[in-house]
Image (cartoon, rainbow, N blue to C red):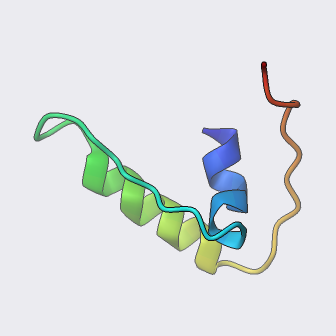
């Protein structure tokens, strides 16, 4: 979640696909991520990726 909130996927030009059954908050999460990225720049740090 922290990686999505940081928005690196947007800067990298990656697509985001949220899958799940109806009523599980997929649209809510998409709206929240969009709103978060429309706010002024926020610095984020996330742990290094696992291999």
Is 23 or 20 nearer to us in this picture? 20
Considering only vertical position in the picture, is 22 above or below 30? Answer: above
Is 9 or 28 nearer to us in this picture? 9
Which residue is at a point 48% across and 62% down the rendered structure image? 15
Q: Single out the residue that lies furthest toward the left.
A: 22
| Rendered location of residue 21, percent (x, y) | 14, 34
Considering only vertical position in the picture, is 6 above or below 39? Answer: above
Q: Single out the residue that lies furthest toward the top.
A: 51
| Rendered location of residue 31, percent (x, y) | 39, 65
Which residue is at a point 72% across and 56% down the rendered structure image? 6
| Rendered location of residue 28, percent (x, y) | 32, 54
| Rendered location of residue 41, percent (x, y) | 81, 75
Quadrant where the N terminus lies? Answer: top right
Q: Is residue 19 rendered to the left or right of residue 13?
A: left
Please count the marks in the image: 0
| Quarter of the figure with residue 23 | top left
| Quarter of the figure with residue 46 | top right
């Amino acid at each position: 979640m922290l990686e999505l909130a940081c928005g690196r996927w947007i800067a990298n030009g990656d697509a985001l696909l949220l899958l799940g059954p109806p009523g599980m908050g997929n649209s809510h999460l998409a709206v929240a991520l969009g709103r978060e990225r429309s706010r002024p720049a926020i610095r984020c740090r996330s742990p290094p990726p696992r291999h």
